[in-house]
Amino acid sequence: MNDLLQLEKSHLWHPFTPMQAWCDEAHEPLMLVSGKGCMLTDQHGREYLDGNSSIWTNIHGHSHPTIQAAIHAQLERVAHTSFLGFTHEPAIRLGKQLVDLLPDSALTRVFYSDNGSTAIESAMRMALQFWKQNGHPGRDTILAFERAYHGDTLGAASVGGIPIFKGSGNDFGYRVQRVPCLEALDHLTKEQTSRLAAVIVEPLVQGSAGMRMWPHGILAALSAWCRERDIFLILDEVMTGFGRTGTMFACQQEDVVPDFLCLAKGLTGGCLPLAATMTTERVFEGFLGTGRAFYYGHSYTANQLGCAAALGSLQVFREERVMEALPAKIQLMAGLLTSLRDLPAVIDIRQCGLIAGIEITPGSPNEQRGVKICLAARKHGLLTRPVEDTLVLMPPLSVTDSEMQRMVHALRLGIEEVC
C-alpha cells in the first residue's frame, strides 16, 4: 500500500487540491477502495458516511444492485459504440424516459454529452447558433448571475461568476452580461437586452457559491421575463436534478419549463459519466436544413454503459418509490440541522431538500476553517467537502434516519473541535 501511495504522489495531479501539501512525505492520502449504500471504506478498512454524495453525484447509494445489474447486462452486449451517425437502444429508451419525467412539457429532445460542463456547453452553443442561423445574428450574449458556477470547461467557466474558478481570468469564452439579481434586469438598456441569446441560472440553489438559496418565486419571475422578450432560458440542474431539492427537478417547484434543461451528476445514480441537454422542438427545428447541423459532440457521447446505468437509476426511482420517502427525510434533516444553531461558530444554515450548507464564522484568511472542520469530522466517520466557510451536507437520497443523525453529529463534533 505504501508503494502505491508513493506512485500516487509521484505521478498524479488532483483537481481543486493544493498539491504541495498533498505530496508532503508526512501526508497519507485517503484511498477509497469500496462502497455500499451510504458507506465508503478506505485502505485500512475504516468506514465513512458519504456526506456529499461523492461530490454531489450519488443518488441511491453505492453498489446498488439494480444499477449494477443494468451495467453488467449491457457490458455483456457492448460497452460503447459511436453515436455520430449511429444509434442504440439504451440511448433511445433513456431519452424517452427523460422526456416522460416532464409530462406535457415542451422539452421533447435530448442531446447527450459527458458531464455537467458539456451539458452547459451544448445548451449555450445551441442557443447562440440558433439565433445566428435564424435571422438574429446580433443575439450573441449570455446573461449570467454573480456567484454562479456552471462548470470548468472554457465556455462554461466564462459564464461562471466566481473568480477562483476562472483560472486565467475573465478574458475568454462567450460574451457575457452579468447581473447580481433579478431586479437588475430592469436596469439593462434596450441594446443590452436585444443582444441576449439566453439567460442561464442554477434554479433554487447556487451550489458552489456556498449553497446560496434563491428567494421563492425568483425562478418563475425570471422565466416570465425571458418569455416576454423571447430570450431562451437555460436551467443548470446538474446538481439539483433527480430529487435533490424534493422534486425530481428543481424547476418543477415553480412550474417552470425552460428552453434548455442541463442534467448530469445524478443522471446515472452517480455511477458513470453521462450528461443530457434537453430542449424543445422549436430549437431542434431551427437546426434542420442544409448546413445547419449542430457540430458539437464527444467520442463517448451516449456511452452505452452510462445510458444503462441511467436507466437502472430511473428504475430504482420507480420501484423503491424514492420520491415518496423524501419529505420525511427532508424534515428530519431540517430538525437535526436546527440543533447546530446553538454552536457559536454557526452563523447560518441553508437547506433545500436534501441539500444543506452550514456557514461558520470565518477565521483568518489562511486558516481554512471549513477544511479543518471536515477533516475533524472525518475522524468521526463523515466524508464531505466545504465551500470555503460553508460546510456542505448532501447525502444520497437513500440515507437512513440513523445515518443522517450520525452525519450531523460528526459535523457538530468537528465544529466543536476546530472552533
Image (spheres, grey):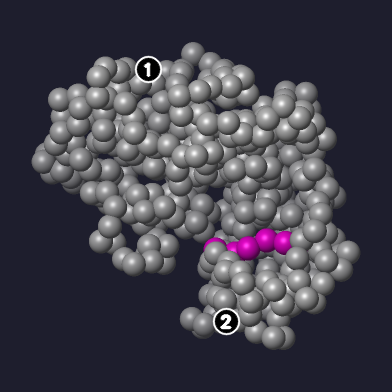
Q: Does the magenta stretch include residue 294?
A: no
Q: Where is residue 2 in the image (x, y as percent from the top left)?
A: 80, 77
Q: Where is residue 151 in the image (x, y as percent from the top left)?
A: 45, 51
Quarter of the rendering containing residue 51: bottom right
Amino acid type, callout 2? Gln
Could you say which disc has been placed on residue 20 in the image? Answer: 2
Q: Distance between the residues labelled 1 and 2?
A: 50 Å
Residue 329 can be seen, yes or no: no
At a point 26% along the width and 33% down the height, the residue shown is 129
The answer to which of 244 and 6 lies nearer the viewer is 6
Q: Tell me if mark 2 has few (under 14), some (14-19) or many (20+) residues whose alpha carbon lies within 10 angstroms of its own.
A: few
Quarter placement of the C terminus: bottom right
Q: Are marks 1 and 2 in contact (CB under 8 Å)?
A: no
Asked if 120 appears above or below 86 in the picture, the reply is below
- The magenta stretch is 382-387
Amino acid type, callout 1? Glu
Could you say which disc has been placed on residue 147 in the image? Answer: none
> On the rendered structure, is 87 left or right of 343?
left
Quarter placement of the N terminus: bottom right
What residue is pinned by disc 1? 281
The answer to which of 50 and 215 lies nearer the viewer is 50
Q: Which SS type dominates the magenta stretch?
A: strand
